[in-house]
Image: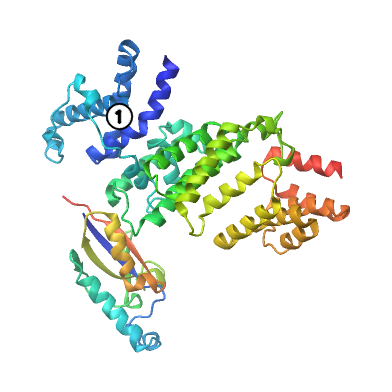
Amino acid sequence: MKFMLLINHGTTPTPNDPEAWAGLSQEEQQAIYAGYMAINQTPGVTPGLWMRPPDTATTVRVQDGRTLTTDGPFAEMKEALGGYLFYEADDLDAAIELASRIPAARMNGAVEIRPLVER
Amino acid sequence: MEGELDGVFREHWGRVLAALIGFLGDFDRAEEATQEAFAIAAERWARDGTPGNPAAWLITTARNRAINGIRRERTLAAKTRLLEVVEASEDEMDEMTFQDERLELVFTCCHPALATDVQVALTLRTLGGLSTTEIARAFLVPEPTMAQRLVRAKRKIKDAGIPFRVPADHLLPDRLAAVLAVVYLIFNQGYSVPSTSGALTADALALGRALAELMPDEPEVHGLLALMLLHDSRSEARYRDGELVLLADQDRSLWSTAQIAEGRAALDRALALNGRGAGGVYMLQAAIASLHAEPTRDWDEIAALYGELSSRTGSPVVELNRAIAVAEAGGPEAGLAIADRLPLEDFHYLHATRAELLRRLGRTVEARAAYRNALALVPDDAERRLLERRVSEL
């Protein structure tokens, strides 16, 4: 099966926020990099592209034929999508296992697993 | 004959459905084929008698029906492994053996990716063989709501890739806890809602017995079975003329000695399997229930077990039970001191307990106030009437 894993950073410090990122010790920073590296090298994983943070988002709606553009993500800032990856695995248990190894999941963020339609 | 067949059907439903899901990998198709097989059996067995191996007969028939159905839908044939299976003829059925896949089924139904109420409904439907109507009634939910809950659950299992498998060892403790919680929830629903009692507690006991048979080495599986049996042994004595009767006032001759004995045997098995390890929460509760079934209750021991359970769960409700045991063992003052510390202002049982302890201490005015608090919060009519009787006796 193919899954998409949507990573929400929540209040997790990321390199996108240099101040918060600097609050982590060097070891913690390295552990996070190593964590993502390990995820990306897991067989079956297709890493996502690196997204800029949610505060750079622009949200578009069309109402009565008019395009409405607003500043910021569709979801609340801290609930906005922070990253993603694809995973080909046997079943949901494998995807849950991978998700639990994503650093954001243990740092106040969360990972949402979405099965993809296969044809 | 009909009643007898019903019993046979209920007994085999979970086993047959589990085998079909394992075979087809699809809940809906499996359910359809299982239903067809049971319908054929109802007709055939009434005429020719029950076959020697009813489960094998039903599984084979359901598989044959499923294969025929799929042959008709050629497009689907390519996607299944069914056509490699040779269709069994009826006289072969008794000799065929099928792996028991109910454990795979129960772990699928109680997968944490499903909400708890969904786990409960699905477990009752698939393993318990209850109809949607019965489940809806038991949980006081409109039938269309329950039907939709089940449809959604089966779709999620399929689309989200929830595996039909017993979890790996490192996942087993958590996942087993979820399964046991579902079974206990079913039991408690039957136990606490008198209108549905009997049926649901019996379903929970049947599930508990099946789990004990399927996972004979798991101490907490036997612990839960013991707990349910020991509680259920008192079911005949819990109500008198529709009124709730507290344990101390119950007519012990109405207790089921057979269930108490079976419960204690399950508890012994749990304790033996557990060895010197810290007891699990079901085992501890079963041990307490077993002490309650003694002619004279050892309140010191009961209080000690509640203490252990409390440190395991951190639950203030368990502490409240400990307070009662401590009051019995060492006087109402000691129990009240524990009860007064608990953050359970919204729980009627706290106020009822305080009221009773205050009454024993002769603090009638405070007791009356506490009963009033309890009455304002009590959700159940039978319990309300019990409290009202208590106030009037002050």
Q: Which residue is mark 1?
A: B34
Which residue is the extreme one toward the top?
B47
Q: Nearer the viewer, residue B295 or A118?
A: B295
- Residue A116 horizontal/vertical position (percent): 23, 55
In the figure, residue A94 lies in which quadrant? bottom left
Please give the name of the residue rendered at 16% of the width and 39% of the height, measured from the top-left corner: B80
- Residue B384 horizontal/vertical position (percent): 73, 41
- Residue B126 horizontal/vertical position (percent): 37, 37
In the figure, residue A25 lies in which quadrant? bottom left
Depicted B242 relative to depicted A101: above or below: above
Depicted A18 relative to depicted B83: above or below: below
- Residue B253 horizontal/vertical position (percent): 68, 30
Which type of secondary structure does the marked residue at label 1 adopt? helix
Q: Nearer the viewer, residue B379 or A30?
A: A30
Q: Is residue A21 left or right of residue B181?
A: left
Please give the name of the residue rendered at 72% of the width and 59% of the height, measured from the top-left corner: B339
Q: Nearer the viewer, residue A13 or B342?
A: B342
The quarter of the picture where the C terminus of chain B appears is: top right
The quarter of the picture where the N terminus of chain B appears is: top left
**Is residue B291 something that shows in the picture?**
yes
In the figure, residue B83 lies in which quadrant? top left
